């Protein structure tokens, strides 16, 4: 089998590039601006509550009306409630940001593992195709095929018709048919389907065939 044929077959056996297939994932927009806004609001509410508390304490020492004290207490309560609400939202935002970072880290880890698996698959596929190429060439030698007949046999295995083989090899269609017939005759096969089955039979068997499995046709002389 030619190096070009092996290369094309290896490309077809490659799994898709995971890195190019995964589109950028935006889990959440940059929350920096919102965090600053909430932090400012929290500081404002706390400052209002603190200043109102100081003012009430000062007024109580100096003496003031009950209405003024109640007003200052309302201001303090509003400041504390507002600060509590803003603090809660700020904490929730921080928690979501942490969860987003953790999700991105997990996604990056899975992507890395998938890329490693793809690299392993490419290496194994390359080794498999190299061994298959050698096995096919040896079988062609056993059948005593000529160089032209070997090329025709490879094109037949790829699924090309006689007309397409003639176009690829720049020969007459009748010549392509004649060379294909010579391949079948030397191999003792009835046609294209038998030729493909001869080489694919072993590839389609499970990794651990049952004991009662029939002997492979490739083992035949």
Image (cartoon, rainbow, N blue to C red):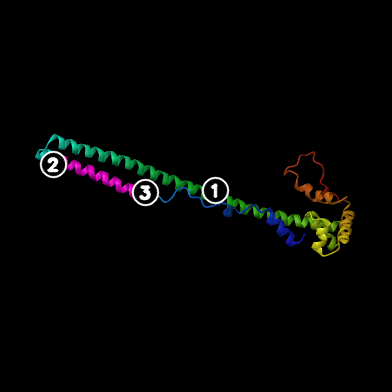
User: Marks 3 and 1: which is nearer the front?
Assistant: 3
What kind of element bears circle 1? helix
Q: What label sits on residue 82 in the rendered view?
A: none
Q: Position of residue 87 (x, y in %)?
A: 32, 42
The residue pinned by badge 1 equals: 110
What kind of element bears circle 2? helix
CB atoms of marks 2 and 3 within 8 Å: no
Does 53 appear in magenta?
yes
In-front residue for pair 203/19: 19
Q: What label sits on residue 58 in the rendered view?
A: 2
Graded by Cα atoms within 10 Å as few (under 14), some (14 to 19) or many (20 or more), the crowding at tag 1 reads: few
Question: Is residue 126 visible to the viewer in this orientation of the structure?
Answer: no
Q: Looking at the image, which residue is at 25% across and 44% down?
A: 46
Q: Looking at the image, which residue is at 42% across and 47% down?
A: 97
Does 139 appear in magenta?
no
What kind of element bears circle 3? helix
The residue pinned by badge 3 equals: 34
Q: Position of residue 60 (x, y in %)?
A: 12, 38
């Amino acid at each position: 089998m030619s190096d070009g044929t092996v290369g094309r077959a290896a490309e077809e056996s490659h799994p898709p590039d995971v890195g190019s297939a995964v589109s950028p994932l935006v889990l959440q927009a940059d929350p920096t601006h919102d965090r600053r806004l909430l932090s400012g609001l929290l500081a404002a509410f706390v400052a209002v509550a603190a200043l109102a508390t100081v003012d009430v304490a000062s007024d109580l020492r100096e003496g003031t009306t009950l209405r003024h004290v109640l007003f200052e207490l309302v201001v303090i309560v509003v400041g504390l409630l507002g600060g509590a609400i803003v603090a809660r939202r700020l904490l929730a935002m921080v928690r979501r940001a942490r969860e987003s970072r953790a999700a991105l880290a997990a996604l990056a880890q899975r992507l890395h593992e998938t890329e490693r698996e793809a690299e392993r698959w490419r290496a194994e596929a390359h080794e498999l195709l190299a061994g298959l190429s050698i096995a096919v060439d040896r079988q062609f030698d056993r059948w005593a095929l000529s160089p032209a007949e070997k090329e025709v046999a490879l094109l037949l295995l790829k699924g090309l018709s006689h007309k397409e083989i003639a176009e690829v090899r720049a020969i007459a269609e009748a010549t392509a048919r004649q060379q294909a017939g010579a391949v079948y005759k030397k191999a003792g096969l009835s046609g294209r389907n038998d030729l493909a089955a001869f080489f694919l039979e072993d590839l389609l068997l499970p990794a651990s065939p049952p004991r009662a499995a029939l002997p492979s046709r490739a083992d035949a002389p």
